Amino acid sequence: QVHLVEHGGGLVQPGGSLRISCDGSGQIKDISTMGWYRQAPGEQRELVAEITTEGDTTYADSVKGRFTIFRDNAKTMIVLEMNSLKVEDTAVYYCFADGLKGGEYWGQGTQVTVSS
């Protein structure tokens, strides 16, 4: 079993920056790609960014050039650095991890609100 816990989030003004992180514990050796999804009220959950164990990254078009995802050397923690935040970035951000043997693991989510 893998447990994911998000940290960070909160309220920030448009144009501001915020960093959220996700710590993994448990059977960490059994996970591969990690990343973030987000879900705004009334919207479907969408992929924001993900990073493989090799460090390859994928970003949603809407966040390219503004968000950066990092992963620590132990491959147990990821960080999403968010810059030039927009009102439309407001959502609950969920950390996820893909299992090497299949399946997915999810964190509880952290609220990011961009508002003046």
Image (cartoon, rainbow, N blue to C red):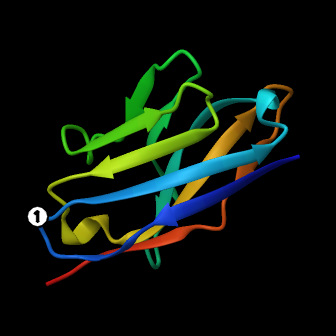
Q: Is residue 38 visible?
A: yes
Q: Residue furthest bottom?
A: 116
Front in this rendered view, residue 115 or 9:
9
Q: Nearer the viewer, residue 100 or 80?
A: 80
Please state the horizontal and vertical placement of residue 109, each as a whole percent of the image: 58, 67
| 65 is higher (above) or lower (below) than 36 | above
Q: Is residue 49 left or right of residue 4?
A: left
Q: Label 1 sits on what residue type? A: Gly
Where residue 28 sits, quadrant-wise, is top right
Instruction: Give residue 21's position: percent from left, percent from top.
Output: 49, 53
Q: Residue furthest top?
A: 54
- Image quadrant for the C terminus? bottom left
Badge 1 crowding class, 10 Å Cα cut-off, few under 14, some 14 to 19, many 20 or more, is some
Q: Is residue 56 left or right of residue 60?
A: right
Residue 38 in percent (x, y) is at: 47, 60
Q: Disc 1 marks which residue?
A: 15
Q: Does residue 44 show up? A: no
| Above-or-below relation of 10 to 95 | below
Q: Residue at x 67, y 41 (%)?
A: 97
Q: Position of residue 9 (x, y in %)?
A: 41, 69
**Residue 76: quarter of image:** top right
**Up-down: is 104 above or below 115?**
above
In this picture, is 89 found above or below 116? Answer: above
At 41% across and 30% down in the image, what residue appears?
Answer: 58
Tally of marks: 1
Query: In the picture provided, is 18 more to the left or to the right than 2?
Result: left
Residue at the spot 21% in from the left edge and 72% down from the top edge = 87
The secondary element bearing badge 1 is classed as loop
Q: Residue at x 42, y 35 (%)?
A: 70
**28 left or right of 73 in image:** right
